[in-house]
Amino acid sequence: MGPKKTRTTTTTTTTTKKRKTPPSNSTARKRARTYDARTLAVQSSDAALSKTGELDVSAFVAAREFEIRALEAGIRNSKAALASRAFQQVPRNLRRRTASHNVKRVPSRLRARARREMIEDNTPTVTARRRKPTKLLRLRLETARRLQNLNARSKARRALKKAAVSAQAPAIAMEVEGDAGAEGAKTKPPHDINIAPRVPKIKKNRLSHPERPQSKFKKRQRCKTWLPTHMFHAKRAHMTSPKEPLWRFAVPLSPTEKSYRPTHRASGARGAVAWDMSYISTIGLEGVEGSLEGLFRALGVGGEEAWGNKGRKWRAGTRSLEVWLFERDGEGGGGGWKRPIAPVTLIWCVEKTDGDGNIEMVDAGRKAKKPRRKMFLRVHPSAFLQVWEELLKAAKLQSQQVMVEDLRFDIGSIEITGPGATETLLAALQPIPLSDGKKWPEGSPEATWASLAGLTNAASLPQNALLAFNISDPRLRHPPLTVKPPASESYLSELAVLLSTWNPDSTQLKPDIFSRPARLTASRLLPSQKAINRRKSLANPGEYPSPKPSDPDIPVLVIASRPKSISKGGNSQGTYTVLLPWKCVVPVWYSIMYYPLSSGGNPRFGGLLEQQQLAFECGEPWFPGDYPGTNAGWAWEMREREIRRGEWERKPKQKRVAYDSIDLGGGKKGEIGQGWSCDWERLVRPITPKSEEVKAKTEATATVSETEEQTQEAEKQETGVCDGEAKGKQRKHKSTSSSTACTYVHTKPPPPPLHIHQLPHPTASTILRIKTTKKPTAKLPTPFQSLLTHPALATVSLTLLNRGTPTPRARLYRLPTTNPSLRNEWLALLGPSAPTPSSQKQSKKQKQKPQAAAALAQDSSRQLPTNLSADPEPAAHLPMPGEEDLIGFVTTGNYNLAAGRGTGVASILVERVGVYDGSDVEKLGGSSSEESGGSGDGDGIARAKGNGKGGGFSQEYLARVCIIRSAGERVGRLGVWEVV
């Protein structure tokens, strides 16, 4: 029996289509439009010929010109025809997927085209109001409707009760007046004016708590606090996970726009970038100046910049100071070395007031009391608890009392950088005019601030300069107008004189930001947005509302800072930091975000990742990520380690990196330590056999986990971790990653294991300079020897010499010390024939140019060695050095848009750095002295020259040469490190 025949039918079945063809024939219109765009208009050349056959040159050239222009227009039209939709013609930051389904989301100039395209494509355009609700949406709408009805009833009951009370009030007042008249006494009727609330007592030496949030947002802030601008960032940025906040704050990580280049251009070329830095902790200190000096000396703040002649302006309150704080008790109970905590910013309050010149000496005979001074200390929230405890310990030991106050939720801050930062702040922060209508006196902080129009770089101001004044509510002048600075030469010369003299050093008065009543008054008198809108509606068209006596005076403190790389010849932008009351951050923030820049556009906002990236591009380390030797830096490393480990474990075995099977060359196999982390324990711990290595690793992991559990249980009682989370941990056995993240967020971070500690920049620079220049047998000075009794880390910046890009967690090697032949092979890459990025580009261009066979045969003998030396990928990569030459790990690494090459920030183990004692320095120098002595490598790499006869690389330079290998890879790149 044969196969069953298929049954054929004469009827044709139409396939089902998701979108049915519209009644109008749009295909013909598309085809006609494409045909019109690709059809070129031409002119015949017969008109240029006369009857006798003579050529009219002008007519012929005009015809050819017409055809060329028609060709160019046809190319443009055919390229644009059907190549892009209307919603693709908007800027990148306005592109959304919903733009293709809703015409109203497209700019008005493109709505007609978008509507026509949607009709032609039969795109369904359904708005949210007309869409048929789903089952879940219908239930939500019904629940919302019931709640609205209940709320309306409760409102009606409250209104009736209020009306009854107001009706009884006049009767009671009349009775009081009648009784008073009968008695013949004067009695004032009860007033209905709200009495100003009392100023709450200052909580001395106690942690503060955030203000109780609104009831509808209370559940979302159980174990974290929202920043003042949370509602702005929540729909425009990627936020931290709700269950895993950073430092007990919901911190914006990065804008939702995927491209980083606009932020890079805004921070350095055109525009401005702003951050809400209210999560930075502020601590207030008050006491006698001698006690405050003794407190900070006990915490490691010393030197000429603080207490010498250089720190005179800082102590006067016209400059800020950025220093490191150290633990008061040294390692082992106050002995040799002190563990660093974190970098902090110290700001003194100016003592001068308006009435200093008219003080009457009433009690001249009495012994005057020492004046009490105030100051602010700003520290990163990851190190706040540790700094707080050290301040309390040091304050109790002072002869006269020092009051420590937690101002984390009283003072907020905004940072802004970029060429347009100055004009943006000038529009948002306008000083309150004098009561008599006169201008501020010349040289005052208010007049100086208004004179900074036209400044394009905050780094032009004096380093860490301060300006303190009071501003009006910026919402009364919203939207702000563009500040147009005068462009005359006289104004620019006056601006240069102002920056050089800087009169506020002598005219700055006591800032109101240090006064607690002034901060509370500004927060309480701040009107609601509804009241602001009502005043705007009553104002004349085109005019701002007139000021009222009840408008708040918002105290602000502006700090101008610049990165340290500028002093080394860099051209980075400076940064403004604005301190103001917590509740006043939002009005200033919206005024900044919607300011129309003179260069076009609006200022951009950034997140935590943008802050890290800009610090990386400036060549500066970022706290706490680039300081693993501190408690906060180690906690950050543990958090990142668990995140990377989770990502690696979630990948299938076929797609994830097999760290155990990586061939490092020379018979070495397997990654050094854990590939998903900077394994500092493996670097510090002595090398053990494989049988003992696994045991040591498990013991160390168990010890670290036990330490974290103990610190977590101890800090739960002090910091008050939410009970629901604690009960959830008791019921469920969570993974190691979740417990580590929770420990990092809610408790004081544990110290690094194995007594690892970080060296500050001046100390690390001095020690490494001695170790890289003197002989190995030379001993360090006695003060530095105690610092190296335990593993010490130094933060360095990396620059790759040839090519490549360092990545986080990359391994850092010194030049091989046990294999001289392998060291010579690596040193050969430092010669003049080594490939550089510029030579690679030139070689690629030479390869792309076609050459004749004869010319290639004639020049083959001359070009063959050059091409071989410029080949960026050699046939076989050099083997990596052994584990004994591992000196550190890369904490931050990427392609640097500012430098145009790959750079990084790393930490190295100081005890493994030594002077280069190889015998091939002169050999290397002799081969490179002639060619690299005058021309350089063309990429901005400064290669130090020695003083020997060969004139090559110095021993100090070769001691800083390193080999960088990314985790999970076998290719190493040559680089040079420098202490930062």
Image (tube, helix red, strand yellow):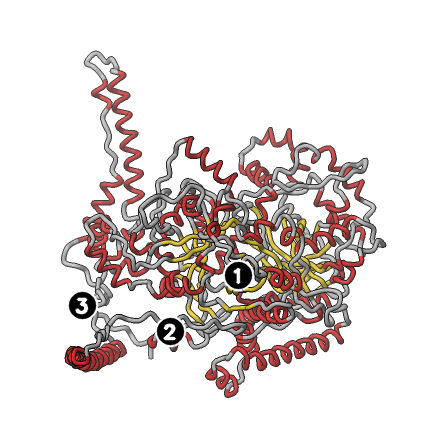
Q: Residues within 10 Å of mark 2 (few under 14, many from 20)?
A: some
Q: Where, quadrant-wise, is the N terminus in this rendering?
A: bottom left
Q: Quadrant of residue 162?
A: bottom left
Can see residue 191?
yes
920 lies above or below 891 = above
892 lies above or below 840 = below
SS for dot 1: strand
Asked if the residue under mark 3 is in contact with the one under mark 2, i.e. CB atoms within 8 Å, the reply is no
Q: Residues within 10 Å of mark 3 (few under 14, many from 20)?
A: few
Give me the residue at 29% from left, 64% from top: 528
Q: Earlier in the sequence, mark 2 or mark 1?
A: 2
Q: Earlier in the sequence, mark 1 or mark 3?
A: 3
**Residue tagged by mark 1?**
374
Q: Amino acid at mark 1?
A: Lys
Asked if the residue under mark 1 is in contact with the one under mark 2, i.e. CB atoms within 8 Å, the reply is no
SS for dot 2: loop
- Real-space CA distance between mark 2 and mark 3, rounded to the nearest whole angstrom: 70 Å
Q: Earlier in the sequence, mark 2 or mark 3?
A: 3
Q: Is residue 150 left or right of residue 225?
A: left
Residue 149 in the image: x percent, y percent? 19, 80
- Real-space CA distance between mark 1 and mark 3, rounded to the nearest whole angstrom: 94 Å
Which numbered mark, 1 or 3, is in the foreground of this view?
Answer: 1
Q: Is residue 264 left or right of residue 536?
A: right
Q: Amino acid at mark 2?
A: Pro
Q: Which mark is residue 213?
A: 2
**Residue tagged by mark 3?**
11
- Real-space CA distance between mark 2 and mark 1, rounded to the nearest whole angstrom: 30 Å
